[in-house]
Amino acid sequence: MRRVDEAVREVLGDAVTHDLKDPRVGFVTVTEVRTSADLRQARVFVSVFGTDEEKAATIQGLASAHGILQTRIARELRLKHTPALMFMLDDTAEKAAKLEALIEDVTEDEG
């Protein structure tokens, strides 16, 4: 399943960068894909640079482009089923930055 997830992530990353012309879709990185066991659904985690409004607009733009993206997956990967895509915001980088700042504050207070 990991190989399928990684292949879908690569195809989507390329498609988002080169195929989508929607102005709502900002600076996006496809960070992870998790497909269901039957390959009928895929949760696509994306990291988006920008404000909360820009992030929400990007998710909407990606959701509206799901047909284009699914077609690209079907054409390139030839899976038994092309998964329905559900886009989710990946805020791991933001959480890591906040945690790093907290750790830095604590170490400064001790010093």
Image (cartoon, rainbow, N blue to C red):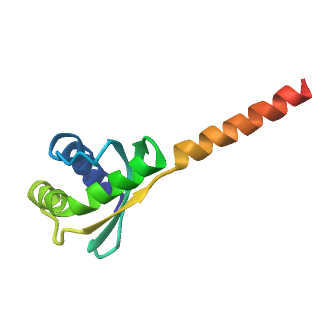
Q: In percent of the image, x 18 and y 72: which residue is there?
A: 81
- Across and down, in percent, residue 76 comes to 12, 54
Above/below status of 75 relative to 102: below
Q: In percent of the image, x 13 and y 55: which residue is there?
A: 72
Q: Quadrant of the C terminus?
A: top right
Find residue 14 and report its image quarter. Answer: top left
Q: Is residue 38 left or right of residue 71?
A: right
Q: Quadrant of the N terminus?
A: bottom left
- In depth, the one of 10 and 109 nearer the eye is 109
Q: In percent of the image, x 27 and y 56: which residue is there?
A: 62
- Residue placed farthest to the front in the image? 53
Task: Count the marks.
Answer: 0
- In depth, the one of 59 and 18 nearer the eye is 59
- Residue placed farthest to the right in the image? 110
- Across and down, in percent, residue 60 comes to 31, 59
Above/below status of 12 relative to 4: above
Q: Is residue 34 left or right of residue 39?
A: right
Q: In percent of the image, x 30 and y 71: which residue is there?
A: 41
- Across and down, in percent, residue 64 comes to 23, 62
- Across and down, in percent, residue 68 comes to 14, 58
Find residue 73 and report its image quarter. Answer: bottom left
- Residue placed farthest to the top in the image? 111
Q: Is residue 29 left or right of residue 80?
A: right
